[in-house]
Amino acid sequence: MLWRKMFRDLNENKGAYIACIAIVAIGLMMFTSFSIVMDNLLASQENFYYYEKFADGFAEMQSMPYSEVDKLRSLEGINEIQGRLIKEVRVIFPGREDNVYLRLISVDPENNAPINGVRLDKGTPLKSGEMNIWLDNMFFDANKLELDQKIEIIAEGKKKELRIAGAGKNPEFIYAMRTPSDMFPTPDTFGIAYIPFETMKNLFQEKGTVNSIIFTLKPGADYKEVEDRLKPELKPYGLKSIYSRKNQPSHVLLTEELEQLNNMSKSLPLVFLCVASTIMYIMLKRTIEKQRGQIGILKALGYNNKEISFHYMSYALTIGTFGGIIGGLLGIWLSFFFTDMYQMFFNMPGLAGEFSLSYLFISIILSLVFSVFAGFQGCKNALILEPAEAMRPPAPPSGKSTLIEKVALFWSMLTVQGKMAVRNVFRHRGRSIFVFLGIMFTFALLASPWSMWDLSQEMLFDQFEKVEIYDIKISLAQPLNQKKAERELQHFPGVNRVECRAEIPVTLKNGWHKKDVALLGIPANSQLHRILDSSKNQVEPPANGILLSERLAQLLDAQVGTELNLESIMLKDPEAVKKIVVAGIIPQYLGLNAYMELTSLQSLLEQGDLATTIMLKIDEKAVPLLQEKYKNSAVINGVEDRIKLLRQSMELMGSFTGTIFVMLLIGVITGFAIIYNSSIITLSERSRELASMMVLGMTPSEVLSVITFEQWFLAIFGMAAGIPLTKLLLVGLAQSVNNDVYTMPVILSNMSILAGFAVTILSIWVAQRMAARKIRSLQMVDVLKARE
Amino acid sequence: MEALISARKLSKTYQMGEIAVNALQGVDFDISGGEFIVILGPSGSGKTTLLNMIGGMDKATAGELYYKDMPLHRADSKKLTQYRRHTVGFIFQFFNLIPNLNAFENVHLAAQIADDPLSAREMLEKVGLGERATHFPSQLSGGEQQRVAIARALAKNPEILLCDEPTGSLDFETSIQVLQLLVQFCKSMGKTVFVITHNSAIAEIADRVFYLKDGKLARIKRNKEPLPPEKVVW
């Protein structure tokens, strides 16, 4: 019978309880979906790494005889070691103008269990010495290729045909990016190809050398020690870099993503569950106050405390159960969608959405725990009452002046309704704080994704419209003489301006802080690559000293004036350590770089006037001609069109619109639920007061204004407090998102503050409209007839 | 003389679940301005229903009810709100003050929405609470609260004052004070006052007494010489 009473009670205020269920469900939806996706990714990663023997260490050299690799095998701590040749080549797809690249990696077809093995999705084994390759499946699919199809590449300036023997994935390229400055994998223009070592050897006329080694460690071996043993062995062969799995680019991105998912799957749901619990607590407490008389009767009839408290807890349990089931199911459903999304970026086997009964169960349990807590807190007061006391009306709420009334000017400006509202704010402190926090939270939930979106757009736009403002960028395969390169291109028809740039891999050290980055040498007064300061004014690259990006400066713990040690294999003496002073720090959101003036960089390197990149201003019509002429040149690595780069990046950003939209929607629902609930609670609590005002002849909107004034009053402060919270949220998000590729600015865009205000106000307004409908149906006669 | 309020075959039926309750059945009367009316009757006789209809808080299910030329039985909720706002004042047994507003603010709340209000301050003084204007309802006694409620009703300067058991929760002395205020309002300002009560002694102060029974107007008694409230005893 009490169950029936509960369902009827819930039905009376179904709007408020549905909103509450919605918040519980949103929280658990996020928990379930993030957790499932994370579990999926983790399991898939672990499995993939284990079975394909993902390397523990990586090293890159200029060139080392293949035979040397065997000698290294005997080094203490090394379990297995493999040498390979890696080269990047252009692919020619007939009829396509854009540049497509393949990174060729040599493999040994005889080795059945190699390190970084390729898991073949389809196809046949590679045959040594034949012109056949395996492609990475992302590239294979994105370019709609077929098995046994032949693709044309340019190796050392010559066209060669390679037959596609298979397609598969490799733990080394789960997140495959061509350069560290790329933001996302672009499988249609960049892929990995695995080719027999013998074939590769012939393709490049390399006399049995390798330029990369990968190795696994013996159980218990320490990577650092092994690295120290390897370094002197590799130095003579032009060691470029040596790093552990921990710093492997694809692994870094995958672990960062997992970390981020882990944080989100724990923190966000907690916030939502707390909001929902608070609403439940307030609603339940209110219901119990209203039903004092009924509790008294139940007690008088002989119901014991346990039965009565269970009855009221059952409200919370019902909400919790519904919220848990709905949230769990939605989360499972959403995890399919998320898994699909991750599959676009992370190339791993076994990544598939699946129905998870255990997470459904966990989400219901979690939801029930929070509900029981809220329910118990809400109803414990009902139990203390003696039956006779319970049946008497509660002591009248005491009225007193509030502190704010001392501000005479403000107080005298208020209408009587305004005074009622302001006093209510201070009387019901708990609820006011709840509304205040709710609005603050709503605002931040709306403004932060908006800001992120806004700024990433601006960032991209700035990068390609204000910083890198060339039309075409030509990357050279090897450094060339600057003067020569300029002369070559200056006279090309349609070219209006030629500038050279040097991109030099360096290691910067400040004490024990150390970072490998690309140091860009930019010519003075450059019109094609401008360095901007935080107020977007052009900064000249310093003649003496170095400019660091903000994040780099942070990583190196460097300030203006700090003296850094610089090492580079591009120095005349690769062993030398140069000292250089930080001349300035500039914002940079894409990539992680240091900057110098080109000629001073050249004199620092003592290698002559070298350049690695040529930037051009060119007439649009001349571009195809240029592409045609240099496409197949051995000294040119790639010809990139800035507008195309911008468009590509914009398209990829587009895939995030969905996520942003979901976050906005969640913000709107939360704001709405909080305001609607607080209105409903206020209405039920003060129905007598409000009815009295109607009797006095006030219109429903005048009566509503008491409640709305109270909410707007809190909303102003809530939204204002939301601004720093948004900032805080952005700092948190930035910390979890930032990496060497992408630095999220912790700046609140004005647009996002405006949007935050607008959408928060809109959701408050809509919630108030809904509550207003209840005022119209307020029964004056019934309310006033009897004492509560 | 034209009637201020007139009722013809006025009926009200409540639907309580599956049972229809006839709260009022075909009531007829005419009331002219400045009358003091007491409505007597046992519980459930339809007193409050009648008062609510006169006050524009409830609508008739059959029959007609006019305030001057205005058909209250046909008025929409907007018109009824305007009617309550400018024409009617209410006083209840349980005061219904806003706990959050002090005495003055409670009165002012009503005054600010009327066309031709009386000064809230003066009204409070008139009911003898000038000194307690800044007190909140929880700091006032029952009698004081009821006097604030009267001041609140009067501040709108209404044509008609409707009182539902105004002395129902007050002691004898306070009740007399309240009744004195009501009579004074009626006689010195020429307003119409309705008082619902169980207490037949109070009927002595009325110009006319309506006896309600089972939703019907059983009889109307006219007092040739209404007693002043201070002479009433119970």
Image (cartoon, helix red, strand yellow):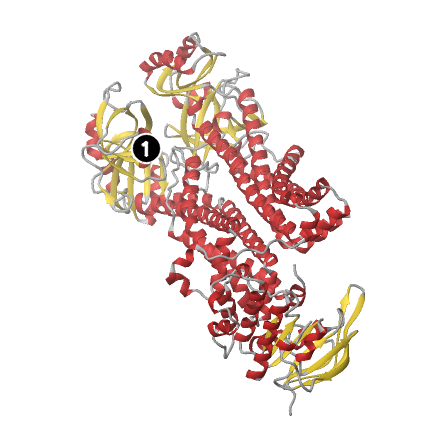
Which residue in the rendered view is the most extreme toward the bottom? Answer: B1
Task: Report x, y in % for residue A328.
Answer: 63, 40
Location of residue A353 by image quarter: top right
Residue A263 appears in the rendering: yes
Please, is residue A360 above or below residue B158 in the view? above
At x 46%, y 27%, the residue is: A251
- In the depicted view, which residue is nearer to us: A571 or A462? A462
Q: Label 1 belongs to which residue?
A: A554
Q: Quadrant of the C terminus of chain A?
A: bottom right
Task: Report x, y in % for residue A459.
Answer: 37, 45
Q: In the rendered structure, the residue with mark 1 lies on which chain?
A: A
Location of residue B46 by image quarter: bottom right
Task: Report x, y in % for residue A148.
Answer: 55, 30
Please, is residue A608 above or below residue A11 in the view? above
- In the depicted view, which residue is nearer to us: A419 or A117? A419
In this picture, residue B75 sits left or right of residue A128: right
- In the depicted view, which residue is nearer to us: A425 or A641? A425
At x 54%, y 71%, the residue is: B152
Q: Residues within 10 Å of mark 1 (few under 14, many from 20)?
A: few
Task: Report x, y in % for residue A586.
Answer: 28, 39
In this picture, residue A480 sits left or right of residue A31: left
- In the depicted view, which residue is nearer to us: B29 or A210? B29
Mark 1: amino acid = Gln
Residue B59 appears in the rendering: no
Please, is residue A40 above or below residue B7 in the view? above
Which element carries disc 1, helix, strand or loop?
Answer: helix
Total numbered labels: 1
At x 60%, y 51%, the residue is: A19
